[in-house]
Image (tube, rainbow, N blue to C red):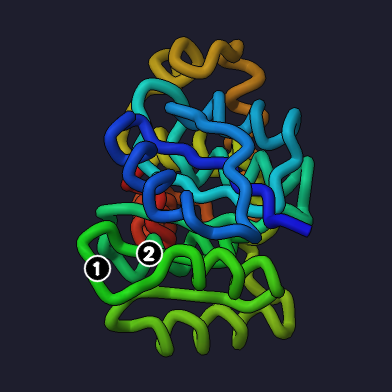
Amino acid sequence: MKIKVLIADDHSLVRAGIKSLLKNENDIEIIGEAKDGIETHDKAIELSPDVVVMDLSMPPGEFGLVTVKRIKERKPTIKIIVLTMLDDIKIVLNTLRNGVNGYILKSADDFDLAKVIKKVHSGEYYINHDKATECLIEFFKKNAVHSHEFLSLSAREQEILSYTAKGYSNKEISEMLYLSVKTLEGYQTKIRKKIGVTSKSDLVKYAHENGLLNF
């Protein structure tokens, strides 16, 4: 049975390059493409791929970390491989906590995408990063006891936390996310309770430590 793959990147040349890399793989089938986060989520739900290979930065639309979280909330069995230029250990850990199974830097030249897809599909993790071992140890150490409060934040809550930490006013955030100010304030109260902070400086620190300032 072939591994069904969805490709997501806002650059058509990148998508074409990925297809070219995989065209001779008899056990991999590309079933769709997407050009932004929202389309990636919708096609993942519609097509039910085995693996999604996606970028994190795909404007316009939502940031890729939110897309990952939304896909995993709806279809937790889908494996996700991030293919990105974002070389930050905080972001790597953040994606793992959101359910990503593989993390590849676009600048890397020492990986075989087909092999990574097969490895991730079989249930393994893959990180192409000079701190890969450190990332995995940190991830599994915290996941083993389910102690990290970050895991309980929904995709929308992560998005709101990001905008709040970056200094946007509640009016600005509510307009960007099409929420009422009252609804937004309700989310913010839940976020503070979940992560156990009260001050703006603590929110900013938390967002920075978890790579949320890159939304």
Please say if the residues under marks 1 and 2 sit with CB atoms less than 8 Å apart.
Answer: yes
Q: Amino acid at mark 1?
A: Ala
Horizontal side of 97 relative to 163 (left or right) equals right
Horizontal side of 105 relative to 139 (left or right) equals left
Horizontal side of 124 relative to 165 (left or right) equals right
Q: Amino acid at mark 2?
A: Ile
Which of 64 and 146 lies nearest the eye of the viewer? Answer: 64
Whole-Å distance between the Cαs marked 1 and 2?
A: 7 Å
Horizontal side of 104 relative to 184 (left or right) equals left
State the residue position of label 2: 104
**Crowding near pointer 2: few (<14 within 10 Å), some, many (20+)?**
many
Q: Secondary structure at mark 2?
A: strand
Residue 204 percent across, percent down from the top left: 36, 51
The quarter of the picture where the C terminus appears is top left
Q: Is residue 167 above or below residue 152?
A: above
The quarter of the picture where the N terminus appears is bottom right
Which of 13 and 80 lies nearest the eye of the viewer? Answer: 13
The answer, for residue 120, to whether it is visible in the render is yes
Q: Residue at x 68, y 56 (%)?
A: 3
State the residue position of label 1: 108
